[in-house]
Every structure is written in C-alpha cells, then in structure tokens.
Image (cartoon, helix red, strand yellow):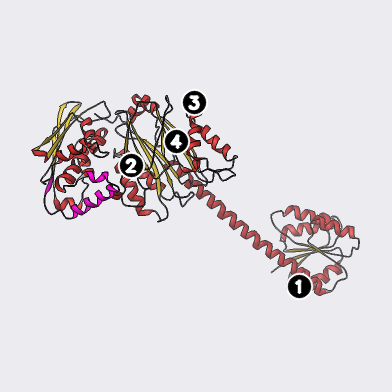
C-alpha cells in the first residue's frame, strides 16, 4: 500500500487529511513537527510527504532541505499544503526542493488529483531509474567483454609472440577492434617471417578472422612450414569462415639471414616498399595475387618474389589507412607523400611519417585502422648470432642411417596431389631435423611437382608465360590429373650419417610417365622464363643434383650440419 506522511502542527488538519487520504486507499502516518517528521521519514520511507510550511522545532523549508539532501539518489515527492499566503514563503520552500503546493482552503478533488499526479511522477521516476540502472549494468558488462576481447586480440593478433629483431611498428585502430593483423615470428631455420594484413572494413566484423589467421601463422611458422603453405592454409581457413563480403589482403616478408635473401608476397595490398638505406633507391612490389578468403588456394596463383639482400634494405609494410587518409579538401595522403615522408628522415622514421599524415589531415582522427611496419634487414643480419640463434638452437639428436620409400599410384595421386607435408612429417618423426625442414620441403616439393606435372601429366610450363597462363596451367593440371589412369611416382629418402653432427639427405624421385623432366627443366632455364626457378634453388641448396634414367629420375643430395641454420 502507498504510504503517505502528513506533517502539520494542527491536530484537526492532520485528522482531516488522514481521513481523506485513507478513504482514497492510502496508508497515512502523522507528525506534528519537523523533527518528528524527520524521524518518521527515516523509519517508514513514505512514498509521499505532505507538509505545512510553518512547523515547530524544524521549519517546513528546513525539513524539505533535509529530506532532499538525504535522498539524492532516490526521488521522494514533497507536497506543500499550507495556510501561508506569502508568495516569498511558498517560493522559498519550492526552491528548497518541494515538488508542488496547494493553499488552504482547497477543493478535496483538487487535493486528491495533485496527490495522484505526484505519485504518477514517482512511478515514472522509478521506471526511469530502473531502466538507467539496467543500461548502466549492460554497458559495464559490455565494456568488460570488450576489454577482455581487446586483450585477447592484442595478445594473439597484434605483434610478435617472441622478440623479433629489426621491427619498428605503429598501430592505431579506428575502433575497439582492429581490422589490421600484424604477426611476426622466427622459423626453426632462423628466418624472420612477418605478415601485415587488412580485413575489409574495420571494427568487430572486420576482425572476425584475425584469431584463426594468427593461430595458423604461428603454428605453421613454428613447425617450419614454407611461406606458400602458410598462405595457402590461411586462405583455406578464411574461405571457410568469412562472410562473402569480407576478404583479407596481406603482405608477407620472409627474411633469411643464412641465405641473405627475402621472399615477398603481396596479396591485394598497397605496394610493398623496399628502400636501400644507403642509396635511397625505392622499389615497389605490386600485388601479384588476389586477396585471401576469396577463391581456393590452387587458383590463387601464389608466386613469391625472391630478392637478394645486401643488409642495408628496409621493408615498409602498411595498410591503406595511412595512404587513404583524407584532408578537408577530399585529397588523399597517397603513396607518393608516404615515400617522400620516409625519405625526408635520416632513419626512415615511421613515427614522423605518421606525424606528416596527421598534419596533412589537420590532425583529424584517422577514419580507418592504420598499421605501419618497418623491417630493418641490417638489424636482422646483426642479430643472427644472438637472438635468432637462441630461437633455432634446437638440439639435434645424433644422426643415424635410415631410409623411407613411397610408391604413389595414379589413384593415390588423384586423391592427394600434395603428399609432401605428410612425407616431411614422417621424416621429422624418424629424425628431428626441424632446423632444415624448410629446405627439405622446398627440395622435395619441386622434385615431386616436376615428376607429376612434366613426367606423368606431360604439361608444358611455358603456358604460364601466356596472358592468364597460370590459371590456364592450373586448369590443365586439374583436367590431366582427373584423367590419369596409370603411372606412379616413387619417392625415396635416404639419410647417411657422416659424423656425430653431420649427415647427407638423399632425395630420389622417379616417375613412370612419358614426359622428360630434364628436357622440361632445360627448356625453362634456357628460355629465361619467370617461372621454373625451383631447380636453380635446389641446386643452390644441395651439394649434388643429378638427372638419371633419361630424365625419369632425379636425385638431390643435401648436406646438413649441426650448429648451422640450414645448409
């Protein structure tokens, strides 16, 4: 029942109000002075207080002030019913916090109507307060969830999990969740692998695929998988989970201190920039394949660009948030200003680049996520003997003689045309040479693909030189493989221990097809085509490389030694 406290020094007035209110269904409490009213208020917490202005011990104005000061977080309506006629008295008690007033004498219906009105205001206030508390609670919960998710993203997605030399970074997001992905790690072979990617848009929808990308990247780099494998698996993962309107552009740089080379991939990003710190020569590497998460990996056309390094190169990876920063005239900051801003600093300072772009935009906030990564090759090379060595110092067990042999029939090849990962895993299961795993993968993949594509399937790789030739080559490969009825590829892997810390790994791959791998390779090399560099890489990695049986068999001999990253 609604409780009403009536405060009036006159017994007859209190009695009249009590009877009137009780007839209307309210529970009524009485107080004859201000102090008694205050005590009653603290005990019963009435829904409404009706008071006279002139009160003994504590005036009506003071009573109103006391109650309002005690109840800042809660609304208690105070209704002044008074004999006072002085406008000043009424004005003072209203200014003290009273919510309405009525001068005596008054019609009973008007009095009850004002009581009902004040109680409706009380209900409205309580509803509003409950809604506000609910919104506040939800906001606090949402904020906590965002902070938790943000910490997870920072841990998984933005930045290396271990100390990687040569990295300078600037990362800022346009929302709580960043649609940019920056990953970097060191492979067992001592290669520094860095990926900067950008999902479509920004915020939570744009970052939905970031954690799977990070998981695939770090797990595969740790296992020594090749760059092509890593990109292919990320692509397949994103193709499976991303909405159709979201894709993932990225640039990937793998710096090999041992071979003093870099492998680059630009999949749908702004040009990757390499600057010679000494000569200030700038080379741009344009996108060579479509963004990830759009088409199947075998149609991507992943072609890595290999660059010989002299130790004074610096790679600049960046997302489009900085080049597409816009000034008040609608003009973009652009790639030319980005390069000029870098070249205007002695050390290619990316923070000064950010400062210049902010000046260009009159210091308005960036509308998109902005990530800029500088990879200093010199620092990576200098770190070879300490930080990187610590990462790759996996203990290699004493070598022993062993061999593996696989016979892959036409039916097996039709079901699985990429058995190399499983074979490499089997090799690691016999003897853990994980520091050399990437080299093993490169060698075996090239030998197997040559045997399959040019031995059994008799494909002509010069098709790739034609316009859209790569896609045509892939189509022909799929068509020929699906029609393959006979033939086999035999892979033999033989390890010969040379000493307690050294061994030779023999890779022997033969096929029963009519194609001549040696002639195909010779044609590719003599044509100086942009493809077919795999054999040259194998020859540079191995101490022996031989064609046998009229080009139907090839043997590569790789010598490894403990205490080095790879041969």
Using the numbered discs, state the Cα–Cα distance from disc 3 to disc 4 in whole angstroms.
Answer: 17 Å
SS category of the residue bearing label 2: helix
Outermost residue toward the right in this view:
86
Residue wearing tag 2: 219
Q: In the drawing, what numbered circle is on residue 22? A: 1
Outermost residue toward the left in this view:
549
- Looking at the rendering, the stretch of residues picked out in magenta corresponds to 462-489
Is 543 placed left or right of 100 in the picture?
left
Q: Earlier in the sequence, mark 3 or mark 2?
A: 2
The stretch drawn in magenta includes residue 454: no
How crowded is the residue under tag 4: few (<14 C-alpha within 10 Å), some, or many (20+)? many
Mark 3 or 1: the one toward you: 3
Q: Earlier in the sequence, mark 3 or mark 1?
A: 1
Using the numbered discs, state the Cα–Cα distance from disc 2 to disc 1 in whole angstroms.
Answer: 77 Å
Using the numbered discs, state the Cα–Cα distance from disc 3 to disc 1 in whole angstroms.
Answer: 88 Å
How crowded is the residue under tag 3: few (<14 C-alpha within 10 Å), some, or many (20+)? few
SS category of the residue bearing label 3: loop
Q: Earlier in the sequence, mark 3 or mark 4?
A: 3
Q: Earlier in the sequence, mark 2 or mark 1?
A: 1
Q: In the drawing, what numbered circle is on residue 346? A: 3
Residue wearing tag 4: 373
SS category of the residue bearing label 1: helix
Q: Is residue 495 above or below residue 131?
A: above
Q: Nearer the viewer, residue 80 or 11?
A: 80
Q: Earlier in the sequence, mark 4 or mark 2?
A: 2
Is 246 placed left or right of 448 in the picture?
right
């Amino acid at each position: 029942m609604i409780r009403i406290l009536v405060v009036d020094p006159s017994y007859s007035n209190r009695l009249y109000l009590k009877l009137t209110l009780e007839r209307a269904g309210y529970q009524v409490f009485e107080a004859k002075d201000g102090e008694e009213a205050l005590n009653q208020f603290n005990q019963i917490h009435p829904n409404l207080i009706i008071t006279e202005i002139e009160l003994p011990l504590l005036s009506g104005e003071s009573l109103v002030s006391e109650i309002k000061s005690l109840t800042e977080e809660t609304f208690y309506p105070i209704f002044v019913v008074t004999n006072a006629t002085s406008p000043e008295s009424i004005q003072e008690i209203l200014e003290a916090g009273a919510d309405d007033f009525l001068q005596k004498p008054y019609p009973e219906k008007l009095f009850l109507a004002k009581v009902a009105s004040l109680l409706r205001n009380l209900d409205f206030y309580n509803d509003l307060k409950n809604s506000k508390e609910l919104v506040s609670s939800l906001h606090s919960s949402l904020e906590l969830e965002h902070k938790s998710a943000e910490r997870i993203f920072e841990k998984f997605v933005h930045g290396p999990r271990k100390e990687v030399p040569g990295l300078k970074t600037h990362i800022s997001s346009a929302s709580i969740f960043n649609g940019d992905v920056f990953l970097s790690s060191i492979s067992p072979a001592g290669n520094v692998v860095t990926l900067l990617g950008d999902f479509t848009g920004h915020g939570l929808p744009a970052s939905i695929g970031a954690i799977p990308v990070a998981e695939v990247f770090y797990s595969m780099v740790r296992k020594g998988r090749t760059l092509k494998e890593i990109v292919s698996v990320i692509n397949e993962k994103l193709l499976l989970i991303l909405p159709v309107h979201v894709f993932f552009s990225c640039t990937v740089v793998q710096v090999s201190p041992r071979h003093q080379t870099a492998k680059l991939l630009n999949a749908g990003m702004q040009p990757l920039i390499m600057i010679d710190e000494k000569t200030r020569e700038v080379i741009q590497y344009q996108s060579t394949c479509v963004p990830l998460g759009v088409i199947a990996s075998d149609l991507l056309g992943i072609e890595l660009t290999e660059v010989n390094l002299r130790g004074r190169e610096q790679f600049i990876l960046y997302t489009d948030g900085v080049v597409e920063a816009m000034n008040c005239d609608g003009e973009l900051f652009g790639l030319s200003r980005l390069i000029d801003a870098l070249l205007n600093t002695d050390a290619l300072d990316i923070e000064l680049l950010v400062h210049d772009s902010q000046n260009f935009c009159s210091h308005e906030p960036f509308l998109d996520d902005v990530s800029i990564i500088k990879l200093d090759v010199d620092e990576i090379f200098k770190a070879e003997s300490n930080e990187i060595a610590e990462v790759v110092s996996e203990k290699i067990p004493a070598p022993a003689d062993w061999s593996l042999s696989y016979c892959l029939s036409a039916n097996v090849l039709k079901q699985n045309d990429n058995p190399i990962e499983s074979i490499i895993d089997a090799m690691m299961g016999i003897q853990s040479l994980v520091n050399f795993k990437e080299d093993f993968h490169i060698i075996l993949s090239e030998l197997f693909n040559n045997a399959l594509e040019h031995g059994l399937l008799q494909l002509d790789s010069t098709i790739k030189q034609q316009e859209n030739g790569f896609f045509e080559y892939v189509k022909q490969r799929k068509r020929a493989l699906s029609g393959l009825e006979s033939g086999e590829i035999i892979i033999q892997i033989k390890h010969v221990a040379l000493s307690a810390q050294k061994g030779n790994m023999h890779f022997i791959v033969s096929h029963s097809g009519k194609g001549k791998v040696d002639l195909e390779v010779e044609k590719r090399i003599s044509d100086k085509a942009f493809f077919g560099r795999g054999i040259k890489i194998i020859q540079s990695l191995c101490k022996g490389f031989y064609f046998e049986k009229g080009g139907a068999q090839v043997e590569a001999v790789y010598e490894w030694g403990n205490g080095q990253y790879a041969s």
